[in-house]
């Protein structure tokens, strides 16, 4: 099997940085080398210290190489609802998103869009995604098949929704259970794929369907669970009205056994103290979706409050409520949301979050999110001078932190020079 040696400036986090001064939290190698074989990083170190014998050498200097970005919440059938004019979440779902998702009943459309979706991710530097399909099993099927063909790490699931949605977008408690189970049997654990049991949210799942999701969760403890929680006030009020016996929105999911360490809860904005305690006790992971929360006017995620309660937060784009596929743009908007809460997202923590941090939230820190030997060779190569405006800013940069902050505030896909999935370059030659 051939070996590849990539030469570049290398950055990889070892643990979460505690402050801008915490430079011991990462490894930064000015003239670094990664040795890759069979899709795995075999060695990381100074260029002179890593053997080049027999390896094909790719030189990305002067660019910065880090682990590929991880997007922990986005919707495959929503690429074409980005930038839809809506007042708030429930209007946006009913007027644009549900009608658009009905198109994904067509397997030919799903197959074409699966390739388009993964192309959008990798061109933005994202190498692992946690995705919602539409209600149609064929959408998850197409996405898994395409990711499998590309040897890309993907966590995904068919949405379960059996009420409060157009007829064409409803399954039943039984069909949602059966189709999810068949997808798990076919795809979970195959290649780099994992299944996420995906009841869309309390509003679109009847108690009978929540029972079915609960049964799946019990049968498949190693599968992820993903849903939406406490995004918007009208959504919270309707959810509590539909489940009057629950103490609050979080308790709806708790009652059906859907809160555990591999549960991913999109948004988690307007939570009461009791709910935060319940999430922390279960070890469930809130997912911050800043571009979506600003775009839909949903509210300001309180990162510090959740962390103080012991929660581990993930961060994500939430395409297509979110407005950019870029995890760099996600960090830019995340920075602004946290500023409004008088919390500051420093660049070391920001880049740790979209790499090692999100990997840890997914329980995958031994496989992705770092450049340590033994990790999967999912990589992104970044140029902080990619646009004239960025290059101008970089003329005044005073080191790595300024470079990262320029990428965090001004970067997008133009700053992504190359993306590697399991050691294979994804962007066109010459980029
Ligand atoms: N809540 C339920 N479904 C959705 C969705 O598709 N996007 C967002 N942002 N929130 C949701
Ligand atoms: Zn979502």
Image: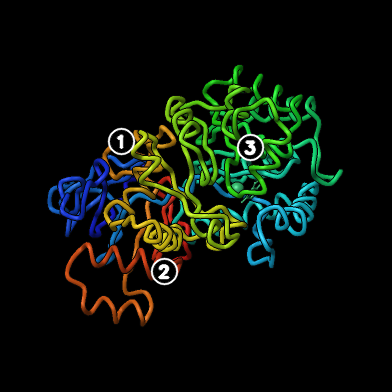
- Within-10-Å neighbours for mark 2: few <14, some 14–19, many 20+: few
| Name of the residue lying farthest toward the left | 48
Callout 2: helix, strand or loop?
A: loop
Coloring basis for residues:
rainbow
Mark 1 → mark 3, Cα distance in angstroms: 28 Å
* Side of 307 relative to 53 (left or right): right
| Residue 38 visible in the current orientation | no
First reached walking from the N terminus: tag 2 or tag 3:
3
Callout 3: helix, strand or loop?
A: strand
| Residue at the disc numbered 1 | 374
Asked if 51 appears above or below 360 in the picture, the reply is below
Quarter residue 213 falls in: top right
| Residue at the disc numbered 3 | 157
| Residue at the disc numbered 2 | 431
* Side of 398 relative to 232 (left or right): left
Instruction: Give the residue at x 70% y 55%.
Output: 112
Front residue of 298/320: it is: 298
Which mark is nearer the camera, 2 or 3? 3
User: Within 8 Å of ligand 2, the CB of disc 2?
Assistant: no
First reached walking from the N terminus: tag 1 or tag 2:
1
The image position of residue 238, as x and y in percent, is: 71, 41
The image position of residue 65, as x and y in percent, is: 30, 57
Callout 1: helix, strand or loop?
A: loop
The image position of residue 142, as x and y in percent, is: 68, 44
The image position of residue 151, as x and y in percent, is: 51, 42
| Residue 201 visible in the current orientation | yes
């Amino acid at each position: 099997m051939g070996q590849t040696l990539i030469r570049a400036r290398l950055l990889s986090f070892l643990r979460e940085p505690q402050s801008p001064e915490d430079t011991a939290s990462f490894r930064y190698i000015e003239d670094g080398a990664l040795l890759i074989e069979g899709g795995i990083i075999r060695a990381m170190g100074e260029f002179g210290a890593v053997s080049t014998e027999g390896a094909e050498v790719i030189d990305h200097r002067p660019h910065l190489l880090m682990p590929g970005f991880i997007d922990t919440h986005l919707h495959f059938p929503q690429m074409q609802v980005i930038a839809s004019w809506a007042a708030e979440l429930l209007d946006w779902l009913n007027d644009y998103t549900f009608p658009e998702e009905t198109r994904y009943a067509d397997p030919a459309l799903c197959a074409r869009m699966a390739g388009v979706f993964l192309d959008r991710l990798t061109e933005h530097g994202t190498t692992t995604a946690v995705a919602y399909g539409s209600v149609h099993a064929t959408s998850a099927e197409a996405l898994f098949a395409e990711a499998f063909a590309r040897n890309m790490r993907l966590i995904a699931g068919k949405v379960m929704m059996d009420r409060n949605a157009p007829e064409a977008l409803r399954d039943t408690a039984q069909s949602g259970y059966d189709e999810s189970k068949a997808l798990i049997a076919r795809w979970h654990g195959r290649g780099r794929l994992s299944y996420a049991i995906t009841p869309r949210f309390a509003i679109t799942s009847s108690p009978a369907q929540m029972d079915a999701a609960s049964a799946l969760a019990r049968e498949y403890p190693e599968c992820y669970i993903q849903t939406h929680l406490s995004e918007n006030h009208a959504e919270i009020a309707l959810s509590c009205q539909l489940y009057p016996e629950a103490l609050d929105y979080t308790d709806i999911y708790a009652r059906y056994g859907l809160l555990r360490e591999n549960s991913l809860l999109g948004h988690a904005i307007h939570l009461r103290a009791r709910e935060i305690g319940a999430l922390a006790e279960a070890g469930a992971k809130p997912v911050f979706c800043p571009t979506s929360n600003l775009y839909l006017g949903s509210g300001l995620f309180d990162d510090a409050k959740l962390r103080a309660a012991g929660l581990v937060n993930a961060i994500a784009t939430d395409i297509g409520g979110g407005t950019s596929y870029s995890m760099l743009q996600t960090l830019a908007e995340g920075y602004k949301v946290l500023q409004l809460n008088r919390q500051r997202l420093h660049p070391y923590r920001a880049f740790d979050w979209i790499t090692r941090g999100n990997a840890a939230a997914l329980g995958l820190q031994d496989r992705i999110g770092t450049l340590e030997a033994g990790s999967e060779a999912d990589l992104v190569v970044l140029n902080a001078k990619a646009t004239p405006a960025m290059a101008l800013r970089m003329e005044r940069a005073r080191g790595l932190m300024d470079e990262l902050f320029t990428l965090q505030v001004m970067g997008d896909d133009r700053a992504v020079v190359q993306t590697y999935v399991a050691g294979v370059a994804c962007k066109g030659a010459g980029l």
